[in-house]
Image: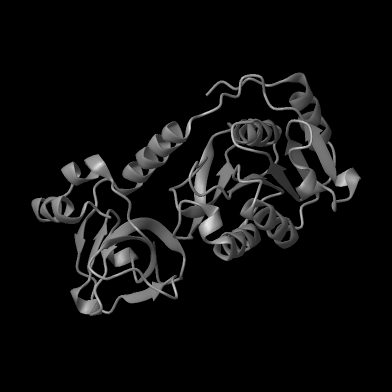
């Protein structure tokens, strides 16, 4: 992937490469180039022999790993980004589970085995996004904050931070605004890719944790995180929840022996062409309830 790198971005990367720091958080509205800057900085540092982790806290527009999860990746020496850990949050929008986003971000940051940790964030910077970003900054305690913004956009988030910790950058001229419809298509495509090849699995004695106090109605497909015996999430899947656990149907594309705990999240959205890749029984179910 070729990245357009403004001179100011390159200058800041050079400065950061030569100074001591542990964690860095990148803030900005949607479509300003946050992911591009994170990828550029991670590659820049990794290619200079530094161990660089990438904490992706955007649930919908992912740099690494599946949607609905906070994910931790690591840059290889050649600059490629590889998934290392993930934590299922159960939502596409961070506003729907602020506590889960903050808790999962802090958990994975603590698991990062690297010299430098770069944190990418969602473009939600108004309304609930202000509280989300403030709690996230408090939990992660970054040494530096990179603010990619047009004039005044991030003032509510930055006014309480020490100025010496904040670096201001203008959005990349190459950044392109996406329509809500385009964002939805991207999220759907990523979700389909993460769930491709799901098949029913028989998992007796499976531990089920519901992330919702007031759970959605039974007999609907729900997205779920699939964890191993160590409690670490391995993948996401689908579960048609029943009030009787032994009647619930789990659909997974990972080896069943690797799954011992299911964490239930949001009711699955309409996944369209996913039905075409599932067995006939589920295709009939899809026709009935549209994975609503």
Looking at the image, is 56 positioned above or below residue 13?
below
Q: Position of residue 230 (x, y in %)?
A: 46, 71
As rendered, which of 280 and 14 lies closer to the eye? Answer: 280
Residue 249 lies, in percent from the top left, at 21, 66
Left or right for 263, reference 167: left
Give the residue at x 32% y 55%. Answer: 268
Q: Percent from the top left, x then y, of residue 90?
A: 44, 60
Q: Quadrant of the C terminus?
A: bottom left
Position above or below: 123 against 269: above
In the image, residue 180 above or below residue 271: above
Q: Is residue 264 left or right of residue 110?
A: left
114 horizontally vs 289: left or right: right
Type of colouring: one colour
The residue at the point 61 percent across, 34 percent down is 39
Number of callouts: 0
Vertical comparison of 228 with 156: above or below: below
Residue 13, position as x, y percentages in the image: 76, 31
Q: Residue at x 21, y 78 (%)?
A: 246
Find residue 196 and report its image quarter. Answer: top left
Viewer-side residue, 70 vs 44: 70
Pick out the residue farthest to the front.
Answer: 127
């Amino acid at each position: 992937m070729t990245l357009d790198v403004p001179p100011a971005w390159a200058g800041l990367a050079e400065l950061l490469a030569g100074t001591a720091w542990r964690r860095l958080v990148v803030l900005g509205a949607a479509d300003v180039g946050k992911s591009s800057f994170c990828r550029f900085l991670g590659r820049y540092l990794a290619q200079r022999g530094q161990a660089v982790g990438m904490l992706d806290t955007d649930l919908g527009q992912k740099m690494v790993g599946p949607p609905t999860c906070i994910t931790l990746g690591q840059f290889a020496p050649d600059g490629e980004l590889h998934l290392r850990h993930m934590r299922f949050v159960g939502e596409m929008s961070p506003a729907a589970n602020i506590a889960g986003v903050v808790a999962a971000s802090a958990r994975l940051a603590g698991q990062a085995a690297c010299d430098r940790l770069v944190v990418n964030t969602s473009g939600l910077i108004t309304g609930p996004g202000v509280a989300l970003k403030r709690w996230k900054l408090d939990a992660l305690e970054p040494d530096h904050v990179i603010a990619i913004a047009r004039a005044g956009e991030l003032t509510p988030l930055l006014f309480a931070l020490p100025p010496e910790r904040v670096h201001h950058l203008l959005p990349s001229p190459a950044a392109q605004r996406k329509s809500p419809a385009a964002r939805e298509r991207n999220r759907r495509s990523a979700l389909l890719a993460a769930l491709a090849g799901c098949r029913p699995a028989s998992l007796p004695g499976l531990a089920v944790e519901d992330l919702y106090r007031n759970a959605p109605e039974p007999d609907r497909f729900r997205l779920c995180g699939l964890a191993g015996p160590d409690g670490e999430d391995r993948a996401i899947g689908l579960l048609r929840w029943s009030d009787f656990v032994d009647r619930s149907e789990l659909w997974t594309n990972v080896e069943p022996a690797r799954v011992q705990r299911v964490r239930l999240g949001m009711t699955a959205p309409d996944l369209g062409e996913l039905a075409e890749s599932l067995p006939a029984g589920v295709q009939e179910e899809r026709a009935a309830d549209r994975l609503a």
